[in-house]
Image (cartoon, rainbow, N blue to C red):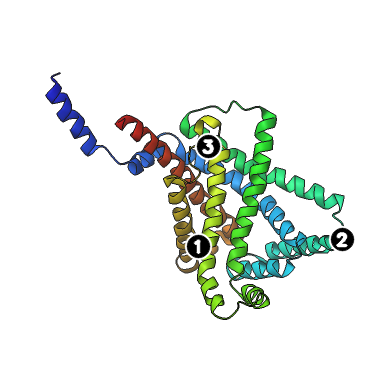
Amino acid sequence: MPRPVEAISARWRTSVAPSAGWRAVRAMTTDGGTDRAAGLSYYATLALFPALFVGITLLGLIGQERLVNDIVHFAEQRGADTATAQVIGTIATAATQASSGALTMALVISLLLGLNAASGLWGAAGRAIDATHGVADERSFIRRRLTTWALTLATVILFLAAVVMVFLGGGWAGELFRALGIGGTFDGIWGVLRWPLAVGFALAALALTRRHAPAPAARQRSAVTIGTLITTGLWLALTFGFAVYVSGFSHYGALYGVFSTIILLLLWLYLLSLAFLYGAELDLQRKRGCGADA
């Protein structure tokens, strides 16, 4: 084929080639990405209460039962059932009482068991990213487990910090700033500042997962990528939109009765899993696009 024709063909392919975003969508739908998201949402469901147990226990250990009670009240206002709220309150009370004395061996063992149970989600996230990249994890079993445990604890703490930032916007922040002698005007500033700080902690947890959960061959060079930013934005939009839909337009309660809560939880986790894997696929497609351009 003559060179001018090749040049015209190359320019034409470049001009009509889909963007990395559309390539990521196509790859998700044709390469089993939606199935991996379903599997990831299953592991997220299994890990939800162990992770919640670890987070609430850590709050209780630092004596912040009042903050836990605020979170329980917030959850009840947004539809959490009474049984879930009672479980959270019981864990917080027990952990707070333990923090007043020495840590009991039973509490330490419970924390370790909860951490191990929650780590299944982060292991599944790493395997899903590996499958997206088409690579195998060659790390030893012990190294993978230790990495997953450390990653689980770190991300739970980061997400916990994000939750604390949100709930520090009420009386907590006012009391803290008045104790430091910087109350008044600063309270209003903090009421706005706490939201980007909470998003920042959540973004850090996501970036940490994307950086260390998968095999070394599937990792990104940068901790914060376009994919992690897009995933964070999608998580916020999906959570807000889903909350509006459930509160105003859905009829799951009338259709599924007592099963409506778990069905809505599974659907929400599935959407979040899709957003997570889309971010990973987007970074991969951008990387391949840059390689092709080079």
Q: Which mark is residue 24?
A: none
Q: Residue at x 42, y 34 (%)?
A: 31
Please, what secondary structure does the residue beneath circle 1 have? helix
Could you say where residue 164 lies in the image, as x and y percent from the top left?
Answer: 62, 63
Could you say where residue 63 lies in the image, as x and y percent from the top left?
Answer: 76, 65
Report the residue marked by disc 1.
196
- Which amino acid type is marked by label 1? Pro
Marked residue nearer the N-terminal end (1 or 3): 3
Report the residue marked by disc 2.
101
Please, what secondary structure does the residue beneath circle 2 have? loop
- Which amino acid type is marked by label 2? Gly
Q: Nearer the viewer, mark 3 or mark 2?
A: 2
Report the residue marked by disc 3.
128
Q: Residue at x 47, y 32 (%)?
A: 133
The answer to the question of whether label 3 and label 2 lie on touching residues, with beta carbons closer than 8 A, is: no
Q: Nearer the viewer, residue 198 or 42?
A: 198
- Which amino acid type is marked by label 3? Ala
Crowd tier of the residue under label 3, counting other residues whose Cα lies within 10 Å: few below 14, some 14–19, many 20 or above: many
CA distance separating discs 3 and 2: 42 Å
CA distance separating discs 1 and 3: 29 Å
Q: Is residue 89 above or below residue 4?
A: below
> In the rendered view of the protein, which quadrant contains the C terminus?
top left
Which residue is most to the bottom? 184
CA distance separating discs 2 and 1: 36 Å
Q: Nearer the viewer, mark 1 or mark 3?
A: 1
Where, by quadrant of the figure, is residue 8 drawn?
top left
> In the rendered view of the protein, which quadrant contains the N terminus?
top left
Q: Nearer the viewer, residue 287 or 32?
A: 287
Marked residue nearer the N-terminal end (2 or 1): 2
